Image: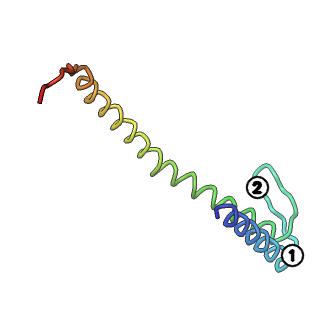
């Protein structure tokens, strides 16, 4: 099931990229501080979309996932410290006649 979902997602992404490329064939100059190159508007839109998704994923990771991982690690350490004295209790086995 998972493989079909990934396959459909990849096909949709390719079709989306193809549509952007075909519908935006105009040449544009892309100028950064150190780099300048000429590309199509579709390629520039795709690069901007990918950059936005990456920035969003990284910011979510830093703001939500890392603090939650730290909190989980801290809780596990605390629960292991609280559980360790209880493991030292020995139980003697004896037969009880009934």
Give the percent coordinates (x, y) of residue 63. Answer: 46, 51
In the image, 14: left or right of 75? right
Q: Nearer the viewer, residue 33 or 21?
A: 21
Disc 2 to disc 1, C-alpha distance: 19 Å
Is 55 rendered above or below residue 5? above
The label nearer to you, 2 versus 1, is 1
In the image, 78: left or right of 62? left
In the image, 55: left or right of 12? left
Give the percent coordinates (x, y) of residue 56. Answer: 57, 58
Which corner quadrant holds the C terminus?
Answer: top left
> What residue is at 85 percent from the left and 77 percent from the top?
22
Q: How many marks?
A: 2
Give the percent coordinates (x, y) of residue 33. Answer: 75, 52
Res 26 label? 1
Q: Secondary structure at mark 2?
A: loop
Of all residues, the one furthest to the bottom in this rendering is 23
- Pointer 2 residue: 32
């Amino acid at each position: 099931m998972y493989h079909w979902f990934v396959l459909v997602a990849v096909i949709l992404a390719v079709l989306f990229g193809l549509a952007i490329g075909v519908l935006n064939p105009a040449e544009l100059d892309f100028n950064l501080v150190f780099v300048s190159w000429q590309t199509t508007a579709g390629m520039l839109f795709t690069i901007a979309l990918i950059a936005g998704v990456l920035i969003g994923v990284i910011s979510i990771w830093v703001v939500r996932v890392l603090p939650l991982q730290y909190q989980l690690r801290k809780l596990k350490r605390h629960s292991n410290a609280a559980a360790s004295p209880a493991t030292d209790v020995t139980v003697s086995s004896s037969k009880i006649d009934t």
